[in-house]
Every structure is written in C-alpha cells, then in structure tokens.
Image: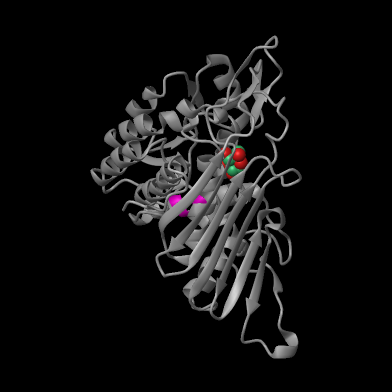
Amino acid sequence: MIGHAFMGLAHSHAWQTAPRFFDLPLRPDLAVVAGRDAQRTAAAADRLGWRSSTTDWRELLDRDDVDLVDICTPGDTHAEIAIAALQAGKHVLCEKPLANSVAEARAMVAAAEAAPDQVAMVGYSYRRVPAIALARRLVAEGRIGTVRHARGLYLQDWLSDPATPLSWRLDKAVAGSGSLGDIGAHVIDLVQHITGEHLTGVSAQLATFVEERPVASSFGGLSGVGDAGGATGPVTVDDAAVFTSRLSGGGLALFEATRFALGRRNAIRVEINGTDGSLAFDFEDMNVLHVYDAHDPADLQGFRRVYVTEPEHPYTGSWWPTGHGLGYEHAFTHQVVDLVEGIAAGTHPAPTFADGLQVQQVLDAVERSAADDSRWTPVAT
Ligand code: SOE
C-alpha cells in the first residue's frame, strides 16, 4: 500500500476485516506500506498491521511478496505509480478519481490493457454500500421501469469556515479539481452505476467561494490544521459544482457537489425516478433505501423504507444478525472482497480503469462547460 493517511487507514482496515467475515479464495497478506517520512510510515505500519515499511514506493515493484499495489495517495501520483506497478506485473487498486486529467487516465487504461491478466480497479467504494448495490439490482430487474430522472448530490460542510486552512485537496496541481473530482466524481459514478447508463453531455457551473485561506502548520482529518504564522495562500480548485446532464437512455440528470452545505456532513443523496417507481438514498442514513412502487394499491402508495440489513440484501448476509447495520468502512471491505474474488477468478472487477476514465471524461466535460459559461458539452467517449 502506498500512502497511510485517511484512505490508507480505511484500506488497511478493509484488508484485515474482509477475510474475517467473508470466505475469500485468497488470503490478503499486508506486506509493506510506503510513505514519505520514515518514522511516520514505520509507526503507521505498526499501527495498521503491515509487516514492513519503506520511503521508496518503487521498492514495492521489485518485491516478490507484493502481488498487488494499493494506491492511497493524492491524484497527482496515481498515473505514475499505477503504470509502473502494472508494468512490474502487479495487480492495482487505485483510489478515486482515477487521475488528475483525461490524458493521465488514458495512459493508465493503456497500461491496464497491456496487462490483461492483472486486475486494475479504481476505488469508487460507495458502489458497495448495500443499499446502493440493492438500488442497482432493482433497476437492473426492471422494478422501476425506464429511468426518467436521476439526482446525485454530494453535500459536505467542512470548508464552510473561511478560517479552515489550506490542504492538498485545495491545490489543483495535487488534487486535479476540488469538490468536483473529490466528491462529485462519487455521485457521477453512483448514478451511472445504479442506472446502468452513462452521461452523454453536461451544462455546468463551478464556484470558488473562498479564494484565499491560511497556510496550515500541519495536516489532519480532511483539511489542514493550525496556522503557520498568519501566512495565507490561494485556493486553486472549485469549492462547489452544479451541472445538468442527460442519460444515455434519454432521462435527465442533475448533480451538485459542495463542501459548503452547512449541516450536511457527508450527505450523498441519490434519487432515481422511473416509469414504474422511484428509489432514494441518503448516506447519512446509509442502511436504508427508500423504494416507491407505482403498482402498489392506491390506498397504500408511498415510499417504503427498506432497512437493508437482511441476508437477502447484497453483502449483508456475511455480517451481523438481522437488523444490525453497517457503516462507512464496510464499503471498503466489500471492495476488497470483490477485488480478491476477481483476482482469484481471473476476471476484471468493476469499476475498472476504463470505468474510471469514463468518469474522468465527465469531470473534464464539466470543467470545459463551466469555463464556457455553461455551454452544453458532450462527454467524450
Ligand atoms: C473528502 O471530501 C472525502 O474524504 C473524499 O475524498 C472521499 O472520497 C469521500 O468518501 C469522503 O469525503
């Protein structure tokens, strides 16, 4: 694994938990973690359960006890690491968004295509929240008919205070974009995943509400912390993104991503309206899927609150007895399960790098549309 901050923590937990609850065909062995600072990386290895640590990620490529490279670093390093790992014969799991540009994502897809026996997967983990997996299943079974509308909102509020310091997520050179790529990418992926359709074009607006912030003295959680003696620096990414879109099946879609929605801590709201019913999900109540069936008797019509914790639901049967819910970290565990099963079966578990490139094309179209006064911009294929 490369990187041991927030995502490194989530992935380490998943690698260790997956074999405890799921009957995996292969057993993950946490060989080595790479980071920039020797002391902090060694401490992370110790705490997170990795056998060894290094400050040189290239060392992973030469080790025989490394079969898979798990990339948990910011976007500016994804392409270089993923391509080198694939060329070295390793499977790759790469955090989202796949890259910081379409060109980088294309090069990563080319490297994956040149290594067809290796898995190259991108970490759109929310796909594997059971309620989301159930929503996809219901759409695929035709339970809501033809999709007319999709809404994908990702609302956070951790940047609302202008005094919150700078961090890598606010630096375009490192993160690629702001709320758009960091959280908007998730809802783009979710809407496409649930509907089984893709976005054909977009009309977008981006905004940066706070253009200058204190320079942080250190990093913690999602943002910088402390202030380095009153110095300030520029925010070079979007704080919020909104766009309208069209689905390949003819429906309309609406998206919003922001870190300024006060009171919304991690609200991922997806709603799909079809010709026979509707589905609604909010991550802040993540064990629930709201299902409306237009064929219910007239006197019983209304959204049904389905508690997605039963053995009949995706993934949940391997966890706790009926009615005992799951949390944020479980989606990462399910990601490991599907990844390991894919490796053992010689398949390519989704989302593949090609799926990651497709989301990158949407992000790129949104940025081009916003730069051109919301002009309708087709999503390249
Ligand atoms: C920060 O906005 C963040 O941690 C994202 O980077 C993650 O992808 C998302 O899961 C939660 O929010």
Q: Is residue 185 above or below residue 137?
A: above
Q: Position of residue 77 (x, y in %)?
A: 42, 29
Q: Is residue 62 above or below residue 10?
A: above
Find the residue positioned furthest to the top: 229
Q: Quadrant of residue 167?
A: top right
In terms of depth relative to the viewer, which is nearer, 243 or 248? Answer: 243
Q: Position of residue 48 (x, y in %)?
A: 60, 32
Q: Is residue 268 above or below residue 314?
A: above
Find the residue positioned furthest to the front: 373
Q: Position of residue 286 (x, y in %)?
A: 67, 57
Q: Residue at x 54, y 47 (%)?
A: 184
Query: Magenta region: which residues?
Result: 335-339
Q: Main secondary structure of the magenta part?
A: helix
Classify the position of ligand 1 by quadrant: top left, top right, bottom left or bottom right: top right
Q: Is residue 13 visible?
A: no
Q: Position of residue 293 (x, y in %)?
A: 63, 80
Q: Residue at x 70, y 75 (%)?
A: 304
Q: Is residue 160 visible?
A: yes
Question: Is 338 contained in the magenta span?
Answer: yes
Question: Is 254 contained in the magenta span?
Answer: no
Q: Residue at x 46, y 18 (%)?
A: 55
- Say whether residue 93 is left or right of residue 15: left
Q: Is residue 292 above or below residue 56?
A: below
